Image: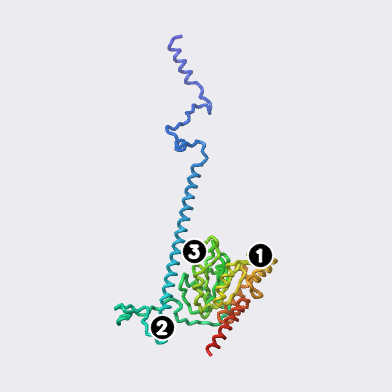
Amino acid sequence: MSADSIMVRTKTAFMSAPTPPAGHERRRPPFTPKYPSSRRHAGGSTNDDGGGYKAKKERQQKEKDKLSALMAKQEREAVKKYMEKETKKDLESQAKIRQAQAYMAERAKGGGKDAPWTKSTDGTGSSGGSSQSPPKKKGPKFQQISLTCRQFSIDDIQDVTFEGSHLVDVPFLGLPEVAVFGRSNVGKSSMLNCLTGNNKKVAVVSKTPGRTQQINLFKVHDSNGPVAVLVDLPGYGYAKLPKALQSDIGTQVRQYLSDRPTLRLAVLLMDARRDPQKSDLNMMKYFRAANVPLLVLGTKVDKLNQEEIGPNLGKLNQYFKLPEGMPVAFSSVTGVNKRAVWNAIRDACVGEYLDLSEEAQEANALVQKLSQGKDEKDN
């Protein structure tokens, strides 16, 4: 056999060889990166389950919490400074007014002293013909109040409008006022919205206690116009509220009550599920001292069983020495005794509401005794 024939047979056999079955192709080796990954480079394991990512998220969350706490602290400090500034202004204004009143009283008696606001030009105390005008009367205490009191029908209440928030110098709106007060988260805003009706929310309901830190005014309208003003006082007794703000709330309420001839009724809200609170008793004393009638409501009775409502309200009645029938059971969810509250507001606006609690009777007797003694002295 020649060499040429051998070569031809070999080439033919190679070309006619069968193809390998599927799955037996030659595979490439796995890819090996030239540089290690960031996780491997940082010293971590290739089988890491995301621990670095979680740690990063935790650090970011801690930074956010720290920033939120700092902003809240700055906000509280700003509110505190503003309250201190406004209180200082109010005290200075009152001091000037007292000076002016003392001077006018001396002048009425025939005294010849110079006015305390007069500037001396020669150092001898005489004005020398150059003097400032008396200090202007400032604030709502010196407004000429024109009070409009009239009967209105509860079924004719058309609207309740928000009239503004105030820290100090709460304006007179020329209408009888009904103040609503109570501990934080007792349900003041919910009660106002319930009284409004028609699914209209005039007061913002917050799940965080202590949100209301100003005095809010709401005007009640019937078909003939405005008839009354509901005054939402700041909530008190919230333990997490800074002590400075808690004392500021007490100062706000005292200033509001110091001279408020248009205030006809105070509605105190108590949580019927809770034990009697000393802070409620202290606030009641403020209104008793101002000789303001009280209506006490036991709120959130919808969250109690029927067997629990009576004993809980009786416990509050005994502790606060309330007249029979108080506190009045109330629920902003079911609207129970909503009409009774409106009846009390209407009667108070026209001077027909009677507060019959024992403390009120003692206070009224004391006022009558003092007035009789004064009359005998004058005679």
Label 2 or label 1, whichever comes before in sequence order? 2
Q: Position of residue 309 (x, y in %)?
A: 67, 67
Instruction: Check disc 1: other Cα within 10 Å, few if <14, some if 14-19, many if 20+.
Output: few
Foreground mark, 3 or 1, reads: 3
Q: Are marks 2 and 3 in contact (CB under 8 Å)?
A: no
Residue 244 is labelled as 3
Q: Amino acid at mark 1?
A: Leu
The Cα–Cα distance between marks 2 and 3, rounded to whole angstroms, is 38 Å
**Location of mark 2 (residue):** 104
Label 3 or label 1, whichever comes before in sequence order? 3
- Residue 249 in the figure: left or right of residue 316: left
**Location of mark 1 (residue):** 304
Foreground mark, 2 or 3, reads: 2
Front residue of this view, candidates 122 and 255: 122
Q: Amino acid at mark 3?
A: Ala
- Residue 334 in the figure: left or right of residue 224: right
